[in-house]
Image (tube, rainbow, N blue to C red):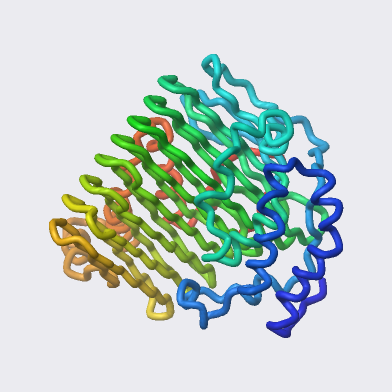
Amino acid sequence: MSVVTDQVDLSLKYTAHYNEVKNALFEDSAEVLNAQRKKAFQDFVKQGIPTRKDENYKYTNLQPSFATDFEFVHEKTVLATANEEVFKCDVPNLNTNLALIQNGWFRKDGKGDLPAGVIFDSLEKIANEKPELLAAYGSIANTEEDPMVALNTAFAKDGFFLYVPKGVIVESPIQIINILKNDVDTYATQRNYIYVEAGAKAQVLWCDHTLNSNQYLSNSVTEIFVGDNAEMEFYTVQNQHNKATNLNSVFVKQGRDSRATTHTTTLHGGMIRNNLKFMLDGENAEAHMYGMAFMDRKQHVDNFTQVIHAVPHCESNQLYKNVLDEQSSGAFSGRIHVVRDAQKTNAFQRNNNLLLTDEATMQTKPQLIIDADDVKCSHGATIGQIDEEALFYLRARGIDEDKARLMMMNAFTHEVVNEIKIEALRDRIDDLVDKRLSGDLARCHECDYQCECD
């Protein structure tokens, strides 16, 4: 493995690679993807790989993550092992419509029974066969605002696509097992697109895993469009080893009377940056964002959220909690923007953090930008350690210190766990959180490969 150390050279390496493969990218991709590609690359060249001097990345240094000499994945690969042996997201009593993504490429091998009209397939396939379903591609994932989104759009070829027609309710969750596995250190690009039409309802569960100990950098962008009076729940479980960097950007645009929920559980990962941007674009829309992360050793998790209240009578709620151990570090930046004339807005944000050692660090930056005058908005953030008085109270009742600490940490995170609406998933996450806090290796899958999380 060779490493590039000059910060300027890092961006040049990725622009040089794009220029080497751009002809093949354009030849092998549909016009709907190519239409965004050139401008996206130009936007990346202008911005480069972000440093701490960039306001939106001031708490996360991506330079070391991009320094590895990665192999880029521009073609589909196939796992040699039979599907049923490779991945099973171990959520008892949960029936799902299942698909596998490996290194950014879609493979739908799992069983499922989708209602008529619902499409759950490869983004590349839909782009070639039904490009009209991707009419809004790139419209909310702004390449001018984030160089990582620009780089994703420049290289994008495949990922998953979900379309739910008007009025259709998908009873069983859509489940994506997102696997990184290769023989060499790998850079993977994944582009996803979800379109839930008016009055429709869907739930998506996305599980991130690494299946061997190579270094990985995954750059993923997901655009979600929620129609009038539609409901969408998007659950993410991140469980990768410490050599993985996960750049995960999710953009959500909501119509009138819609309800959208995101819930992110981070159990493991070396470097994780979650970008989440909501656009409430129809009156009476509701947006709910929940997240919790568990960090130890030198892991780093950065949650960056933006909510734009573009019209009156909308509501947003954010609740993020983090537990940091050893020399880990975390960041939370939450930005709420209530635009002019977006009256009768309700917007609430809370970030609570628990530090288990003196070496763990947390940066939190809640922000309110309010250009309307008839609103109810609040934000709050706390960073602290375990309450010694409460710990003494438990120990005085015969509970040993380790168990008492575990009980207090579980109580701290339970508020976020309880917001998972899928009962079987909520029970499983509760169990995984308990194992993670007690020091066991928490895994959302059972497979023949051993994931090295050290």
- Left or right of 314 on screen, residue 163: right
Give coordinates of residue 319: x percent, y percent: 30, 55
Of residues 102 and 147, the one drawn nearer to the viewer in this rendering = 147
Query: Could you tell me if residue 247 is visible in this image?
Result: yes
Of residues 414 and 344, the one drawn nearer to the viewer in this rendering = 344
The mark tally for this picture is: 0
Work out which quarter of the rendered image holds the N terminus and state it.
bottom right
Query: Could you tell me if residue 188 is visible in this image?
Result: no
Residue at (29% x, 35% y) in the render: 257
Q: Quadrant of residue 281?
A: top left
Give coordinates of residue 209: x percent, y percent: 62, 48
Residue at (81% x, 65% y) in the render: 17
Residue at (52% x, 16% y) in the render: 115
Work out which quarter of the rendered image holds the C terminus and state it.
bottom right
Q: Is residue 308 above or below residue 367?
A: above
Residue at (73% x, 83% y) in the render: 5
Q: Is residue 160 above or below residue 213?
A: above
Of residues 251 and 92, the one drawn nearer to the viewer in this rendering = 251
Q: Quadrant of residue 232?
A: top left
Residue positioned most to the bottom = 6
Residue positioned most to the top = 116
Residue positioned most to the left = 374
Of residues 346 and 334, the one drawn nearer to the viewer in this rendering = 346
Give coordinates of residue 26: x percent, y percent: 80, 50
Give coordinates of residue 448: x percent, y percent: 71, 40
- Left or right of 256 on screen, residue 46: right
Q: Is residue 351 above or below residue 125?
A: below
Q: Quadrant of residue 298?
A: bottom right
